């Protein structure tokens, strides 16, 4: 194996320990950062994510509240809860776990969260702020990836950066953050022609498509930094990323594993955003 593995768990642990100290310092000034997490319905994966977020809050000394609502909750009931939390002084961050049941309007719920408490950074106002480079919160997954790239010691300035995937929560903001750091950025998607050739140009390749082991070693430039955002199951039901780890690790210079790469960073950045919200 050639690639240096980027240890997301270790980077996350070090950031969480810094956050713990910052939370303690804020508590001395009388403010305990508080996060409210809303979950609607019984999606098992969502339940695991929410419980991990609660645990992470407790670990760094933050306060959290969970609102587990039944699947048949109406749009009005959900919006009323968001409004109540918008006005609750001990709550600094509000997160509504997605996806919501089909009858609920996700966009309306996101837009109802006060931009000041929008610790996922999904509200249009916060998304716009990222575009102009004047932001309070960064979306958790791309922000976590920037920390992982930083941990390699590689300077993004002038590098060819390729982002595969253009979702609002990962691909698009990711491209913007790389651009802010002076990368030369290309965004690829399902209609991109000659994906392999474009990927092979990348000094920094970020893959967020949701297809198990889709990016193989022959699509990677020798020595590239490869960040695998995907969370999938392979043909044997084993947890895996969008990058074929075995072939990629023979070519890449740095590579994130799945699990243990991007995943641990996402929750860490949520904690960071909650602290930022509380500190204001
Ligand atoms: P979406 O499904 O919203 O977006 C997928 C993107 O991939 C789309 O832009 C799509 O293109 C593109 N795509 C799909 N197939 C191809 C293809 N064959 N070639 C090129 N591009 C393609 O996914 P998300 O961004 O929400 O998530 C991506 C992955 O990351 C998932 O596995 C998800 O579980 C994981 N994830 C992990 C997180 C973590 O914390 N580790 C956090 C968030 C997501 P088009 O727009 O043209 O359809």
Image (tube, rainbow, N blue to C red):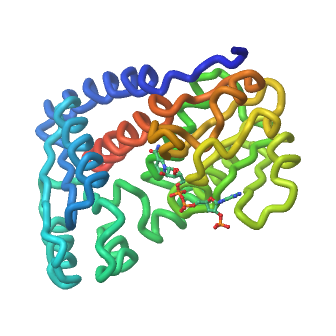
The front one of 239 and 56 is: 239
The front one of 210 and 34 is: 210
User: Which image quadrant shows ligand 1?
Assistant: bottom right
The percent coordinates of residue 51 (x first, y second) are 21, 44
As displayed, is residue 151 above or below residue 268?
above
Residue with the most extreme front position:
236
The percent coordinates of residue 280 (x first, y second) are 29, 49
- The residue positioned 22% from the left and 30% from the top of the image is 60
The front one of 209 and 169 is: 209
Horizontal side of 23 relative to 32 (left or right) equals: right
Horizontal side of 156 relative to 274 (left or right) equals: right
Could you say which quadrant of the image residue 224 lies in? Answer: top right
The front one of 97 and 102 is: 102
As displayed, is residue 10 above or below residue 233?
above
- The residue positioned 58% from the left and 56% from the top of the image is 173
As displayed, is residue 3 above or below residue 65?
above
- The residue positioned 14% from the left and 43% from the top of the image is 63
- The residue positioned 18% from the left and 84% from the top of the image is 76
The percent coordinates of residue 235 (x first, y second) are 53, 43
The percent coordinates of residue 209 (x first, y second) are 60, 54
Horizontal side of 122 relative to 94 (left or right) equals: right
Horizontal side of 184 relative to 142 (left or right) equals: right
As displayed, is residue 110 above or below residue 146?
below
Quadrant including the N terminus: top right
């Amino acid at each position: 194996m050639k690639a240096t593995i980027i240890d997301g768990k270790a980077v996350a642990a070090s950031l969480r320990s810094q956050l713990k100290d910052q939370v303690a310092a804020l508590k001395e000034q009388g403010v305990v950062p508080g996060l409210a997490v809303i979950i609607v319905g019984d999606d098992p994966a969502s339940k695991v994510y929410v419980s991990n977020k609660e645990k992470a809050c407790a670990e760094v000394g933050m306060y959290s509240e969970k609102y587990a609502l039944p699947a048949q909750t109406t749009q009005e009931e959900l919006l009323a809860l968001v409004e109540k939390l918008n006005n609750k002084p001990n709550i600094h961050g509000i997160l509504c776990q997605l996806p919501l049941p089909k009858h609920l309007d996700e966009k309306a719920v996101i837009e109802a969260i006060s931009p000041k408490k929008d610790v996922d950074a999904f509200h249009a106002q916060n998304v716009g702020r990222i575009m102009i480079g004047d932001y309070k919160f960064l979306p958790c997954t791309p922000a976590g990836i920037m920390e992982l790239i930083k941990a390699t010691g590689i300077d993004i300035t002038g590098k060819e950066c390729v982002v595969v995937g253009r979702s609002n929560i990962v691909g698009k903001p990711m491209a913007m953050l790389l651009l802010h750091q002076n990368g030369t950025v290309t965004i690829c998607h399902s209609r991109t022609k000659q994906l392999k050739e474009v990927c092979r140009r990348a000094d920094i390749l970020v893959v967020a498509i949701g297809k198990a082991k889709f990016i193989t070693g022959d699509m990677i430039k020798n020595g590239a930094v490869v960040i695998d955002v995907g969370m999938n199951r392979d043909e044997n039901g084993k947890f895996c990323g969008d990058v074929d780890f075995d072939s990629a690790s023979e070519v890449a210079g740095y590579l994130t594993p799945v699990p243990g790469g991007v995943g641990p960073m996402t929750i860490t950045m949520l904690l960071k955003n909650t602290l930022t919200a509380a500190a204001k």
